[in-house]
Amino acid sequence: MSNSSALVPISLGEPVPTGLLIGGRWSESPGGLTFDVENPATGESLATIADGDLEDAAAALDAAVEAQASWGRTPPRVRSEILRRAFELVTERSDWFAEIMTLEMGKPLPDARGEVAYAAEFLRWFSEEAVRISGDHGTTGDGANRIIVTREPVGPCVLITPWNFPLAMGTRKIAPAVAAGCTMVLKPAAQTPLTSLALAATMQEAGLPPGVLNVVTTTKADAVVERWMTDGRARKISFTGSTQVGRLLLRRAADTVMRASMELGGNAPLIVCADADLDVAVQGALAAKMRNMGEACTAANRIYVHRSLASVFSAQLATAMSQLRVGNGLDDGVAVGPLIDSAGREKVQRLVDDARDRGAQVLTGGVVPEGRGYFYPPTVLTDVSTDSAMMSEEIFGPVAPVVPFDDEDEVVRIANDTEWGLVGYVFTTNLDRAFDLSERLEVGMVGLNTGIVSNPAAPFGGVKQSGIGREGGRVGIEEFLEYKYIALPRRPGPKS
Ligand code: NAP
């Protein structure tokens, strides 16, 4: 990590940069401003990093624009091998990345290692896609012209990532952009910038040329991103975060007609049918709820269980959830780390109190523990009223609300009665019912008898207000490619 401008003052084994990455150089913000990154398990400051301003934003975009022409013409194999090398480096440094994520985001180390493997896989997947970009060839209907269709990089991209999966949300955008030949300006979440800085340093080491990936850490997200979006030279925005901010960015994208990919919030229904395998359903619900302490867009937010199974399902889920150890994610045996901040925890408590006021029973959890850190216990609520606030808001915490249902048509109607449509989960042992419910749910992804859908080989994304576009899978690279059609008249060749 020879380009690091400064070291994070904690023992990570390797230094982590704390500056801005612009045009291949690490630097402090010329304005000298900095901000602190907090450890949510302790409330202590982990590091002080550069707080980029509008000048830095402009310099980063200048660097991306300058690098675009040559980077866009780089042989696909070169781009592929940079990504492959990055995959190897991230994998070799799994413990390092995992520790950084646990420190700044809170997730337990085993989960963080899982995220490293998931994140690294996007680098490998898109290293394989970089050399498979192809076009098309045809003839016009009247036979007079040839149609040649080529694919080109979209151009400089604005990438914005959230705090909940700081590494994977980065590689899920950076890897296809690199594969397609796009340059980038990246603004990571202010609460988890260290992971992105470590990734950027690793990408440099893997051979990514100067200016291809520029990173501006900042507390002025709105102003910095607005600077990029109103400039006119950035051609695409790829955003992962809340629907609220996504809407704002879509409105801004209209002004310069930027292409937009939006990975936004969710309100996932999880449906357990009367014929479900109970153990599979409980384990599936546990995974869908507790991944990342419930701080996931894919988290099961509403659990609908057929009335015939509701009480035994709730009891088993409560037993499983109450056995999960809560604590500092660095400690052995911890399965549930802290939430990201006090505001996040207060929101979870507000939603639990509201459900309780409307008649919900608390089977386990539900009380904020004493002491430092933003911990919240795994919580199971039963008999949750459908007008409870948590039925229409992302909980973003380890709280599982169970609602009994009697009729399948009714549960589909309620499941779809939301502005979101990211993912839904269905548990049933009947094949026809499985397909029928999967088809009727208004979502971009369905987990059938599983609580985990995320995979780099699959197209991740939502419908309705959960987003626009897909990340990963064979379509992931499409988001960063444009079509160009070349018309060529069909004339007889010269006679020799
Ligand atoms: P957020 O508040 O929308 O922030 C996401 C990113 O946008 C952060 O980098 C943030 O910067 C930045 N941002 C905030 N306001 C902005 C503005 N006015 N202009 C430009 N950028 C702005 O979301 P979050 O709380 O970090 O993440 C949680 C949300 O992300 C949840 O809704 C979750 O469902 C969603 N999510 C979706 C997916 C998916 O794939 N669909 C995946 C993960 C998360 P600061 O950090 O500086 O505020």
Image (cartoon, grey):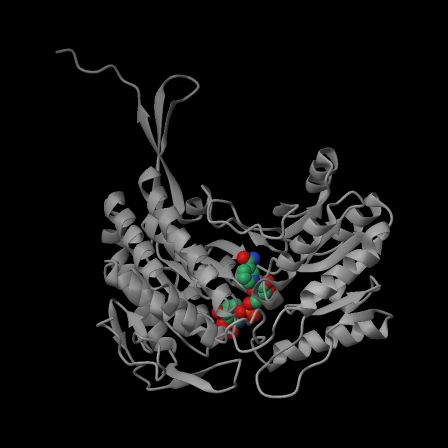
Image x and y of residue 387, in percent:
83, 64
Look at the image and tell me whether residue 266 can be seen. no
- For the C terminus, the image quarter is top left
Q: Which residue does the image show at 34% across and 48% down from the upper left?
A: 179
Vertical comparison of 74 with 168: above or below: above
Res 130 → quadrant: top left
Q: Which residue does the image show at 45% across and 86% down from the upper left?
A: 45
Q: Which residue does the image show at 53% across and 78% down from the upper left?
A: 328
How many dots with numbers? 0
Vertical comparison of 96 with 341: above or below: above
Look at the image and tell me whether residue 196 can be seen. yes
Q: Which residue does the image show at 27% across and 53% down from the upper left?
A: 82
- For the N terminus, the image quarter is bottom left
Res 10 → quadrant: bottom left
Vertical comparison of 254 with 223: above or below: above
Observer-nearest of 458 and 212: 458
Observer-nearest of 217 and 300: 300
Observer-nearest of 37 and 184: 37
Vertical comparison of 127 with 349: above or below: above
Image x and y of residue 366, in percent:
74, 76
Residue lying farthest to the left in this orientation: 496
Image x and y of residue 326, in percent:
60, 75
The reply, left or right, for residue 202 in relation to residue 401 is: left
Image x and y of residue 371, in percent:
61, 88
Residue lying farthest to the top in this orientation: 495
The reply, left or right, for residue 368 in relation to residue 11 is: right
